[in-house]
Image (spheres, grey):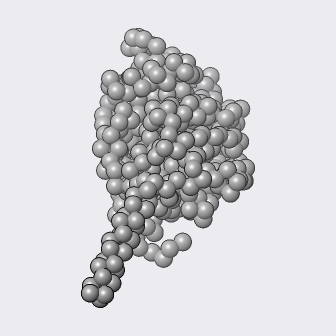
Amino acid sequence: MLNFRLKSLTAATVMALCIAAQAQAQTPKISNDVVKIGVLTDMGGPFSDIGGPGGIVATKMAVEDFGGKVLGKPIEVISADHQNKPDIGVAKAREWMDVEQVDMLADVMNSAVALAVVRLVKEKNRIAIVNGASTSRLTNEDCTPNSIHYNWDTYSIANGTTRAVVKQGGNPWFFVTVDFAYGNSLQLDAEAALKQVGGTVVGGVKHPLNSSDMSSFLLQAKNSKAKVIALANAGGDTINSIKTASEFGIGRDDQQAIVGLAININDTHALGLAQAQGLMLTEAYYWDQNEQSRVWAKRFFARTNKMPTSTQAAIYSSTLHYLKAVEASKTDDAATVMQTMRDTPVNDFYTTNGRIRADGRMVHDMYLAKVKTPAESKYPWDYYKILATIPGEEAFLPLAESKCYLVTGAAKK
């Protein structure tokens, strides 16, 4: 009888322990009782209209639409200007993770900043979802298990535009490139795409970031006699390049054409259709593409008086994807949330059936577009004609060509 009671007690105890363990496993675990998101961006420099203040608005919209809380805990958004300097960006990111206990870094504008920051989030075991930076190294040579590249990258925008221009007879090429990680990566990816389709490069020139005077660089491009002058820059540098080219008469005849490899809708708006008309570009998102994209864009416009860039739209989408993963995982643990994000398709106004690969690349369709003429534009911000959809599997670097150690199985960095 005593032995039976002991066995019963033991069984009951084991059952209780199992129930307790199961309950503990299902209990939400949010570190520091808050989920904190840090938007690291360019607030007043050449990329501030691409992400910048609008990116912060997009992040806050995502948090509001999610309900302001996750698993019963508040969601906080903080922001900082890295001034396009990697040392400032890393210092701020380190402070956020060590002192502010930030769980996820958003936007991470500027490729040089992003490359430095993703190494740090790996070390600190947090998450970075990069949207503003474009270098394809982020999911190739410099991939990490803690970072996602969500929007476009230099491979996708270089391939789409380059192939389309060469197909229309645009060859040979001369590059005007911003001299930092993004520009160098964009030119290399464009040159690789040119080689594949039989294009040639006759030269190039590099300029500093945020150059106010592009005259000498555009004169070198004009004197090269290249059929295509490719702008491997972005933001204010692209706008200044196109304005300078117009002053020198470049692009007014069939002798030379300007191709912007990274044209954002804010660039087109700043230039005006009279100057921007005819430009070919590759985009990840266009506000007027369908009803879903228009509904969200108009909400964004009501807060900013501007239509969103693809970067700002991607910041909203990726923030919401992150918060849904925290909720589904019942934790803000970085590794668990990252796995849930990889396992969950992205379906929203930004993209359909997007997926995050092992290298951190969010694969989604891209769009080849052309800037309308003033006569073709029927209402404000009616700027693009979508010429073709580039399937995600074609738009981004194939995994078979990846140098990411998470894909190749090489020794862990």
Tell me where residue 172 appears, x and y as whole percent: 46, 43
Q: Is residue 296 left or right of residue 266?
A: left
Q: Is residue 161 left or right of residue 45?
A: left
Q: Is residue 127 above or below residue 315?
A: below
Q: Is residue 111 above or below residue 339?
A: above
Q: Is residue 249 above or below residue 180?
A: above
Question: What is the quadrant of the C terminus in the image?
Answer: bottom right
Q: Is residue 37 left or right of residue 88?
A: left
Q: Residue, x 43% and y 62% (percent of image)?
A: 24
Tell me where residue 88 appears, x and y as whole percent: 73, 50
Q: Is residue 113 left or right of residue 28?
A: right
Q: Residue, x 63% and y 57% (percent of image)?
A: 116
Residue 178 at least partly seen: no
Between 141 and 69, the residue placed more toward the observer is: 69
Identity of the residue furthest to the front in this view: 1
Residue 381 at least partly seen: yes
The total number of labels drawn is 0
Between 151 and 99, the residue placed more toward the observer is: 99
Question: What is the quadrant of the N terminus in the image?
Answer: bottom left
Q: Residue, x 36% and y 75% (percent of image)?
A: 13
Q: Residue, x 68% and y 41% (percent of image)?
A: 80
Between 297 and 372, the residue placed more toward the observer is: 297
Tell me where residue 406 appears, x and y as whole percent: 43, 67
Tell me where residue 143 appears, x and y as whole percent: 50, 61
Between 18 and 334, the residue placed more toward the observer is: 18
